[in-house]
Amino acid sequence: MYLESLWVQGFRVLEDKHLQELGPLVVVEGENGAGKTTLLDAIYFLASGRSFLGMTNGELVRDGSAYFVVGGEYKSYDSVARVPLLHSVQALYTAEGHKEARIDGTIYRGFIHLIGGLRVMQFNFNSVFLVKGMPSVRRQFLNLLIASCDRRYLETLSSYNSVVSRKNVLLKQGIVGEGNRSLLDLFDEQIVRLSNSIYAQRRTALVAINGDMERLIGEGLFGRLAGIRISYETQDLDAETLRSAREREIVRHMCLAGCHLDDFVLTRNGRPLRETASLGEAKITSLLLTFAGAEYVRSMSGEYPVLLLDDLEGDIDAQNMTRVTRLLRCFEQTFVTSFDVERLGGNLSAVRIQL
C-alpha cells in the first residue's frame, strides 16, 4: 500500500498543505509545533476517521477555520485484477458538525466508511498506553486492526454498539416493567450472539499477533523483550451471565457484560507489563506490537500497511535502531518524524518534507 499524494486544509496547525511524489521513505522535519505529528495524524484520519491523539473532530478544526479537509490518493493491490489500483479518498468536517467522506467519487455521510480503504499502522508517544493504559485503548487498537482487513467485523461491531446503546437508553429510563424486561431479554440475546462472534475474531487475531511478536523477537528485534506474550482469557458470553447482571445493570443504568468491556494483557513471565515495565520498555513493547500488527495486516490483505512512526527516537539503542531500519525495508512506504535523520541509518534514501 502506497500513498501517492496528500492534501490537508484547516487540520489543527496545518493551514494548507499539498504533497506530491511521495517516496517509500518520507521524513517529516520541522521545529516543535510545526505540524509533524499533525501530518501523520491526518494520514491516520484518512484510514480510520479519527485522530490517533484522541481529539474530537471539532478539536481538529484549525483555529479560525470553518472546516478541515484531508484527502489523498493511494495505490492498493487488487487481488482480482492482480494489479495495483489507484484510489482517492477525502474527509470533510465543518465546525457545524457536518461530516462527508468521499471515496472514489462516492459520497458518504459518516467517517466509518473510511475504514478498510487506506490501511496504516501508527506509532507515537501515546502508544505506550497500549501497555500502560486503560483497556479501551487496547480495544480501539484491536478493533481498527481487524476491521481494516474485514468489513464483516466492522459491521458486527457496529451492530453490537447499536444494541448496547439502545439497551443503555432503556436502563437509564429507570422504569423496568414487564414489557421493558422482555425488551431487555431481546437485547441480551443479541449481545450474547454478537459478543461471541467478536470474541472469536479477536482470539484469532491475537494468536496471529502473538506469534508475530515472538518471531520478531526471535529474529533479533528487541531481544530484551523475550518472554513477552499476549494473554487473552475472555470466555464466551451466555444468557445466564447477563441475567445475573440484570439487577446491577438496573441500579447502575448501564450494560455490565459484553465485548465492550473486553481486554487483552501483555505479560512477561506471567506478570502484567502495565505493572512492571518501565516507560522505556513500554515504548519499545508498543513499537513491537505495531510491527506485529503490520504483519497481521499483510497476512490478511496481502500487502503491508503504510507505516507512520512519530517520536521514534529515544529509548531505542543503536543496535535495535539498525534492526528497525531493516524492518522498514519490508514496507512499501513509511512516514517518520525525526530530528536526527541519520540515526535511522541503513543508507535509506528519503523524501524530506520541511514544515
Image (cartoon, rainbow, N blue to C red):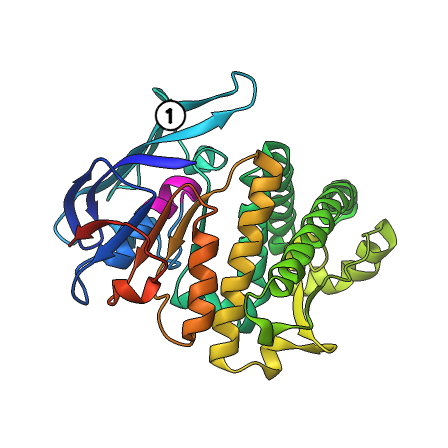
Q: Main secondary structure of the magenta part?
A: helix
Residue at left 56%, top 41%?
298
Farthest residue to the top: give it. 81
Residue at left 58%, top 55%?
292
Which span of residues is magenta-colored? 43-49
Instruction: Report x, y in % for residue 59.
Output: 28, 55
Q: Which quadrant holds residue 13?
A: bottom left
On the question of residue 162 being in view, the answer is no
Question: In this figure, what is the number of numbered marks?
Answer: 1
- Quick one: SS at disc 1? strand
Nearer to us in this view, 44 or 292: 292
Q: Which quadrant holds residue 190?
A: top right
Assess disc 1: are there few (<14), some (14-19) or many (≥20) residues with their C-alpha within 10 Å of its C-alpha.
some
Instruction: Report x, y in % for residue 33.
Output: 18, 64
Q: Amino acid at mark 1?
A: His
**Screen quadrant of the N terminus:** top left
Asked if residue 159 lies left or right of residue 68, the reply is right
Residue 45 falls within the magenta-colored stretch: yes
In the rendered image, which residue does mark 1 sit on? 87
Instruction: Report x, y in % for residue 179.
Output: 76, 42
